[in-house]
Structure formats: C-alpha cells, structure tokens
Image (cartoon, rainbow, N blue to C red):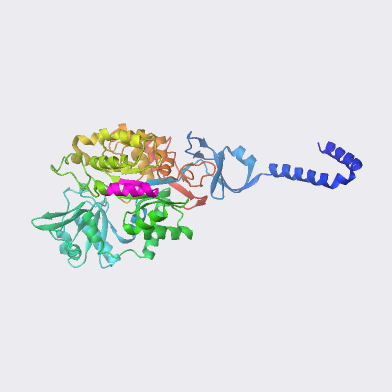
C-alpha cells in the first residue's frame, strides 16, 4: 500500500505539482489517524487473576477489570484487556474475589459515628449490673456532665422485663444518665434526667409513653417520650459532627461499605457531610433521608431534590410507629404477650398524608418507618392516594417487618419498595413470636416481599444491628444469626438466593436510592467502587461464609481500606 501510494504521489507530483502540498498533508493525517487507533490507550489500573462478580443484569463474572479516572472502563479477559490498553498500575488479585462495594440501604451512619464518640457501648450486656459497670468505666474516661449509653436489650437478660432506674439513682444521683435501648425506640433514664426534663407521673406525650409504677416514673421512656430528655444534652458542635462522620466512615470501609442510606439527617448534619466530601475527607457516598423537622425540611422543599455521585438528597423520612422489642410497633390486633396493647402511633394518618402531599409536590420520595402490620396498612392507604400503578417514584416502607397477607400485593401494585434488614429477622427470632403469636408466619417475609417488585433493597439499620454487610448476606441466605442458629434457618422459605442477596446489598440497594445509574455494579462507566474478599460468598460452603473477610475496599478507583 505504501509503495502504491508513493507511486501515486510521484505521479501526482509530476502531473499536478500545485496539489503536492495538500496531498502530503492529507496522507500525514491518515497516518496519524491509523497510528492513534493502534496505540494502546493508557489506563490507571488493571486488576487481574481474580474472580470479578460484576453483578450486571446477567450476573456475569470476569477475570480482569480496567479502571480509569475513578470509573470502570471494561471487564473481560486478561489477554483481551492487555492487548487493548497500557496500564499505569497492575494489580494481581492472586485468586481473590471482587464484588461491587456494599451499599447499606437503611442505616444511621451519622448516629453510629456520634454514638461511638459519645456513648458507652452497652451491646451484649446481660444484666443491669453489667450495664452499670460499663457506665462507670466509661464515665472515668469521658468525664462529661451527663452520661449516655446505647445498646442494652432486656431480651438478652435473665429477667426479660424492662429495667427501672433504682440502681442508676443510687449510683448516679446527681448526674443525668440516658441509656438508649438497642432499637433506639426506648430509653432508660435516671431520676436526675427526669427532673431536668420536667417529667413526672402525669406527663403525657402523643406517640410515646412514660412507664409509671406505683405513682412514679420507672425511668423507661418509649418513642416520642425520648425527645423530652434529648434537650439535656447539648447539640453536637461542628468538630464533633466531623469526628462522628469520619469515625463511621472508617468502620464502614473496613466492612466493605462504599455507600450508605442514612435514615434521617438534619440540615446541619447534611452540611457537615457536604463539607467533608468537598474537601475529600469523606469518600463514603451518602443518600440522606431528610429528617422531617421544619428547619431541615423547609429549605429543602423550596430548593427541591439534589443529586450528585457523592450525596443524594431526594427523600423524606417519617415514622408511622415504634419497634417490636419495646412494643411500640403498631399492630392490627393486640400484642400476644400484652393483651389490650396495640403499640404506638408515632405519626397519625393525617400527618403522614400531609407529608406525602409535600413529597409528591416537591419531587421527593417518602420513606416511612413501619414495623407493625397496622403501620404498614395505614402507610399503604396513604400512599395509594398519591401513587398510580406503574409509577417509578420508589416510595419506600422502611422495615416492613409484619405485613398482613391482605396487604402484601399492594407493594407490587403501587410500586412501593420494602426496604428490609435481614439481620432483624435473625436478631428478633428469639422473642418475636412471644409478641406476635401466629402472626410470626407473615413477619420478616423477605422473599414474599421481593417477589412483589422483583427486587428488594437490604440494609442493617446499624447501630441497631452490627454494621457488617456479610452478616446481612448470611442472614438473608441462610436465615441464621452469627452463631449459626437455628440449625435449619428461621422461616427458611423466606430466604433469598445468594445472587438475590448480593443484588439486594449492591445494585438493588442503589436502585432504592435512585443511584443505580452510577453505582451498584461493576459495569463500564460506573464508579469504581469495589471490594476484595478472601472467599467467594457465591460458591463457598455455608459454614465458611461467616469467616470470609473484606481484604480491601476501593471507592472511586482509590483504595480506602
Ligand atoms: Zn432506622
């Protein structure tokens, strides 16, 4: 070809000398174009010699992946990718397993970090004695003018009744003590805290309760009553908010999380997130559900939803009821272990409807916390006034723990997303039947719920559960807790397959946040958020799975753990 071109060139030069310059330029351009096409492009990173689960629509698996400028460029075979590109860095996976970064579709990221910075950890305590021992150690190390703790659960104690304040009063007579139950829906406070909050036996709170015995408050506050003592503690300042967010990020990256949906942030907290993301210290992607307090809500309703790959603000969080453990879940029929009690209406139907109207008008999702079957039914009733069948507005019901069989099909019909937490099933299974009786058969029905829309997001609700998404995977697939109990799994008919469970923690979780366009799977153009595990959760024997560890976490093409 070169020879014939030269011959042609000679001919043209001879015949048409004035065209010589133009023609040479043209040839030069062609040569440049051909060279450019053949030159391998330079890419930032090649990962190879691993098993890469892309979690794309066909659940494809690749041996190698190309990352450039924070994004996935291509997955495929090592030979093909090497032939196509040059790489600044090549990483031998040494046979390890790669998955998209985990996404927690419902957690309290900021609250977890704040708690870790400011509250004594009471999880796993087995008695009030042990609670008090931990508080004394904590208070020595953190001499604040108040004491906060979190994580007690009377269901783990020998005496499974709510504790009272007697022991706290004798040991801490002059300093307010506030101890949040594991589910965040009940709190034990001492006499000093009650006095400071102005609570006595006659105090009434709508959507909450103050337990009273022999004419005096026992110290147990449930749901909205907790708000009465919150004011005793000064609000977190900016420095504490930053510390909390960074602490939460560190722990989350260590378990493979690259994105979280924070179920209720206030304006100041969202500002803190934005600040830390802006200066590059917070790489965690955050879907912030708005706390419905007027100070937070008003400016957001005025400005409308906001969306970028770091921070998505396009939903409002509401509570319809409380939690099952503290008998605050709102039930259609009374509690089996407390005749006459139906639970708590944290927000009534009118408030839910008003918020739904605002959400619809201003283009936000509405995400309502519903644990009991009455809360689910009321919320679906409200939603049905705003959602047309076939809509893709992805309004969510958070938890959807007890769903009456008559209401199940309404999820699919209205396109309502049940946002569930697999470890709630395996934490509650020890005592949920006492509360629910035969209703247990339609509680924690994650497979049935998944079938409604064909997909389901999963999360943990941490700090209520542990933050580790691999526990979610194990609970979703095997319906067992971290100890491997029970033998055959709790209601195994509602287990998800391994593929479904992985999707629920990645691409389906992203979808519930309107984030599936840029994350949730390892496909060309999406952000390079991925994790490397030392075992294969898709094929490993069941008994191996609880010991599989996150070796590395990458966010936007950068290693963060
Ligand atoms: Zn929650």
Q: Main secondary structure of the magenta part?
A: helix
Q: Quadrant of the N terminus?
A: top right
| In the image, farthest residue toward the right | 14
Query: Within the magenta stretch, is there residue 364?
Result: yes
Query: Within the magenta stretch, is there residue 178?
Result: no
Q: Position of residue 213 (x, y in %)?
A: 10, 55
Residue 467 in view here: no
Q: Residue at x 52, y 43 (%)?
A: 93
- From this view, report whether residue 112 is shown above or below residue 144: above
Q: How many marks?
A: 0
> Would residue 49 appear left or right of 294 to someone viewing this image?
right
- From this view, report whether residue 192 is shown above or below residue 474: below
User: Which is more toward the observer, 370 or 132?
Assistant: 370
Q: Position of residue 479 (x, y in %)?
A: 31, 37
Q: Position of residue 6 (x, y in %)?
A: 85, 40
Q: Position of residue 73 (x, y in %)?
A: 56, 43
Residue 555 in view here: yes
Q: Residue at x 88, y 40 (%)?
A: 12
Q: Residue at x 28, y 34 (%)?
A: 491
Bounds of the magenta segment: 351-368
| In the image, farthest residue toward the left | 214
């Amino acid at each position: 070809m070169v020879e014939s071109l030269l011959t042609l060139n000679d001919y043209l030069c001879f015949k048409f000398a004035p065209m010589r310059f133009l023609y040479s330029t043209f040839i030069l351009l062609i040569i440049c174009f051909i060279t450019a096409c053949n030159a391998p492009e330079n890419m930032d990173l090649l990962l190879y010699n691993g098993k890469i689960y892309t979690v794309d629509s066909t659940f494809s698996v690749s041996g190698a992946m190309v990352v450039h400028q924070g994004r996935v460029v291509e997955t495929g075979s090592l030979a093909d990718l090497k032939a196509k590109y040059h790489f600044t860095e090549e990483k031998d996976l040494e046979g390890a397993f790669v998955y998209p970064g985990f996404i927690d579709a419902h957690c309290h990221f900021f609250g977890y970090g704040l708690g870790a910075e400011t509250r004594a950890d009471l999880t796993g305590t087995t008695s009030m004695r042990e609670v008090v021992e931990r508080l004394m150690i904590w208070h020595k190390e953190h001499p604040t003018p108040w004491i906060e703790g979190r994580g007690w659960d009377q269901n783990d104690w020998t005496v499974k009744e709510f504790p009272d304040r007697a022991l706290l009063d004798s040991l801490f007579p002059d300093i307010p003590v506030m101890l949040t139950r594991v589910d965040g829906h009940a709190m034990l406070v001492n006499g000093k805290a009650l006095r400071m909050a102005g609570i006595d036996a006659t105090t009434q709170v709508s959507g909450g309760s103050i337990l009273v015995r022999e004419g005096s408050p026992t110290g147990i506050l449930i749901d909205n009553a907790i708000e009465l003592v919150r004011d005793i503690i000064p609000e977190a300042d900016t420095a504490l908010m930053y510390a909390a967010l960074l602490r939460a990020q560190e722990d989350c990256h260590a378990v493979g999380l690259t994105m979280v949906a924070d179920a209720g942030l206030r304006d100041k907290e969202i500002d803190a997130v934005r600040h830390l993301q802006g200066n590059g210290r917070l790489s965690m992607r955050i879907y912030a559900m708005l706390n419905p307090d007027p100070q937070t809500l008003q400016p957001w309703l005025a400005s409308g939803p906001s969306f970028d790959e770091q921070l998505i603000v396009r939903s409002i969080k509401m509570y319809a009821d409380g939690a099952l453990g503290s008998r605050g879940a709102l039930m259609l029929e009374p509690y089996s272990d407390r005749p006459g009690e139906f639970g708590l209406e944290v927000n009534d139907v009118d408030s839910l409807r008003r918020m739904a109207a605002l959400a619809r008008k201003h283009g936000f999702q509405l995400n309502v916390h519903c644990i009991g079957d009455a809360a689910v039914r009321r919320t679906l009733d409200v939603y049905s006034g705003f959602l047309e069948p076939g809509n893709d507005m992805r309004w969510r019901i958070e938890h959807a723990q007890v769903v009456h069989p008559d209401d199940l099909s309404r999820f699919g019909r209205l396109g309502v997303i049940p946002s569930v937490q697999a470890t709630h099933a395996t934490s509650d299974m020890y005592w949920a039947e006492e509360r629910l009786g035969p209703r247990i058969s339609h509680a924690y029905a994650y497979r049935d719920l998944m079938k409604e829309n064909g997909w389901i997001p999963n999360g943990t609700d941490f700090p209520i559960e542990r933050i580790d998404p691999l526990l979610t995977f194990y609970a979703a697939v095997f319906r067992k807790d971290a100890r491997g109990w029970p033998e055959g799994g709790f209601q195994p008919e509602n287990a998800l397959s391994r593929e479904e469970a992985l999707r629920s923690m990645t691409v389906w979780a992203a979808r519930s946040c309107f984030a599936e366009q840029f994350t949730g799977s390892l496909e060309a153009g999406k952000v390079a958020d991925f994790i490397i595990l030392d075992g294969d959760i898709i094929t490993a024997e069941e008994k191996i799975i609880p010991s599989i560890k996150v070796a590395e976490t990458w966010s936007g093409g950068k290693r963060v753990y």
